[in-house]
Structure formats: structure tokens, C-alpha cells
Amino acid sequence: MAKKNFLIKKNEYSVIFVSYVRSSPCFSCFRWAALCLLVILLFVGCSSPTSSNSKRPQIIVDADITEDTVWESGKDYIVKGLIFVHENALLKVQSGACIYFSKSENEIPGRIVVSGQLKCLGQDSINCIELLCSDNDINKNNYLIEFEDSKGIQLFNFCKFNKMDKVISNTRSQMTISSCTFIECKNIFNNYKTGSVLIEFSNFIRCSEAVNIDLSPQTEDSEIKIMNNDFEDCSDNCVFINYSNVYIQNNIFSNCETGICINYFSAVDMLHNLFDHLDMSLTFTKSTGNVIYNKFTNGIHFILFEVNSDPSVNYNNFLNCTKGKILLGKNCNKKINLRYNWWNTDKIEEIMQTIENSSGNYNNIDEVILIEPFSEKYVENNNSVSYMVNQND
């Protein structure tokens, strides 16, 4: 079964363990006192960085960072307006700090543009770095954090992003996003042109258009890896790939609309991913790649092959599809390699009934795809992992 992750959310609730003797004459008073204390702790724990009730030091950031700077643990840093991290400067954010994006006095939305280096160094799921932005301060035209020709490796480690739009944009920079949590965010990460990127051990919960990789025109000096992540209850595309070569391994996609859209002259290597309860797991348009050792289950449709796509789809498990396992779109290549998969049956006529000729262009589907031979038995592919706490169902 799929491995699930359990998020530990910071500052969202407080818990009081109260031991008492029910026969005590002071029990009723003690109970109400404990209840009042709980309400107070909940109010304080959920206060925003700009709340007047917050006892954390609040630091206004409204000037460029021109030299090495540390944003310290336990403090709230309120970014007002446009801030640049200059080429030779390093901004290091310690675990437990909070970054809040806010408009400046002249209504310029808060955002950070990095030409130097940014390292957000959260320690774990409790001592993480929170990044926040209210609805009134959302920047609709630009990303909150932009990297362009930045120096060194940019790092986000154990960061928490909550209800944010247009979060990170990367152009020609090296970046690692590791062990982060994105909750109800949209347009989370966009990578343009060149740049080496690793996205790993992160959670994308109820997000939309989470990861966009577009390296047009395609270059050979870019390395994109998406590994060991959990995409859950996401709308639109979880991952969109355009003009890019991407390695995708050990991810979980569950209860989402579309898992991965591979578009226009892209090539993907996909291994040991789990696609569970998706409307559409994969789409290929003018693209290719290797789809090997993945598990597709409980979906409406599994794979759509569109114009001039010829990936090799082998040694996968296709189980419990409600409509069509495979959709053949307009002008897809003939002889698509679907050999050595397991379809939960060894009867060729049953397999062919779940392949849908959606374009109506093909008189004989068996002339378009290659199915035989197929696996003789079904083998579990449960290598997908999520960060934090892993537990088998």
C-alpha cells in the first residue's frame, strides 16, 4: 500500500495534557481554568507575524541586502516592497524565522529578487521556516522570490508555504527545494531556460499548478530531478514539463486532476511513482521518455498519447481504471511500446477494451500500440516515499 506522511504544523494549535482526579472537589474550577488557558494559547499560537499580540521581535526589511546577512531564529522579518539580494551577498535564514511579504508605503508588493545567494535552513518539521503573505498583499504580476543568474546553490530546506500564489521563479540558477510543505498554493515553482534543480522530500497539499519546468530552447547543461515528493488533492497539473529533460522518481500523486503533463520535445525518465485516484495520470504531446516500474491505480484515465509521442511504457501496473486505461489522441505515433505491463488480466481482449480511440482516427487499435507480451504476474511497486513520518497503510 502507499506510504502516507503526517504533517506536524507549527503554531497552528496548542495541546494541554491535564491530569486530574475526578473526585477532587476542585475539579470543576480546575477544568474551567484549563479551558481558559487553552483558549489563550490557541489565540497566541495562531497570531500572524503582524499581530500586535505577537511577542516575537518584528524586523522591517525595506532595503537591499548588499553583504552577508543572517535572519535569526525566533524573529519575524517583514519584507516591504521590492528587495534585492546583490550578487556577492548571502542571505541566510535560520530555522524558526518567519518571512512575511507585505506592501510598502507606496503599495509595491513585497518580494525578493536574488542575484547573490539565498539559503533557508530549516532543521525539521517543527523548527521550520514559515513564509506568509496575506490576500491583500498578493503580488499578481511577479513571483515572491525570483532568482536570475544567481551565484551558488540556492536552498530551501524545511520551509512551510501557506496559501501563496506565484512563489518561486528560477532562471539560470542552481536550486534545491528539500523537505518543504506547500499548502493551498498556486504556481509554486517555475523554472525557465537553463538551471539545475532538485525538488525532493516535499509535500504539495491542495495546490494548483505546482511545478512548471520550461527550458525552451532546450539546453544540455540543465539537470532537473523531482524525487520523493507527495502531491495530494491538487488541481490542474501537478507537474508541467515543456522543452525539458526531467528525471521523476519515487513520487506519490493521489486524488489529483492531472499528474504530469509532458509537452513539446520533452523527455522524461519516470521510475517507481504511484498514481492513485487521478482523473488523468500522464499526458504526452510531441514528447518521449521511459515510463518504467510505476503503479497506476483507481484512475479515470491513466495515459493520453497526443501528437507525435512515442515513449516506452513498460513494466508498470495498471489497476482499477473506471473508463479507459489508455487514450489515443489525434496523430499519435503508431506502434507505441506498451509491452511487459500488467493489466490485472492476461486476456488480450479485455486489455483492448480499456484502450480508448478518443480521436476516431484508427480503425484497428492493435496497429497503433504494442501490448504483447505482458507480465505474467502482478508485482507490487511500493517504492514511493514521502518525507517526515512514513507508515504503511
Image: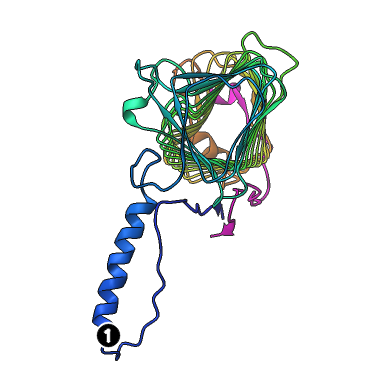
Q: As drawn, is 142 to the left or to the right of 341?
A: left
For the point 33% across and 64% down, the residue is 38
Asked whether 92 falls inside the magenta stretch, the response is no
Quadrant showing the N terminus: bottom right
Say which quarter of the image contains residue 134: top left
**x and y percentages locating residue 216 in the rendered image:** 61, 10
From this view, report whether residue 244 is shown above or below residue 252.
above
From this view, report whether residue 102 is shown above or below residue 272.
above
**x and y percentages locating residue 155 in the rendered image:** 65, 32
**x and y percentages locating residue 364 in the rendered image:** 53, 22
Q: Mark 1: which amino acid?
A: Cys
* Residue at mark 1: 26
The answer to whether residue 334 shows anywhere in this view is: no
**x and y percentages locating residue 33 in the rendered image:** 28, 72
Highlighted range, magenta: 364-393
Say which quarter of the image contains residue 291: top right
For the point 75% across and 15% down, the residue is 220
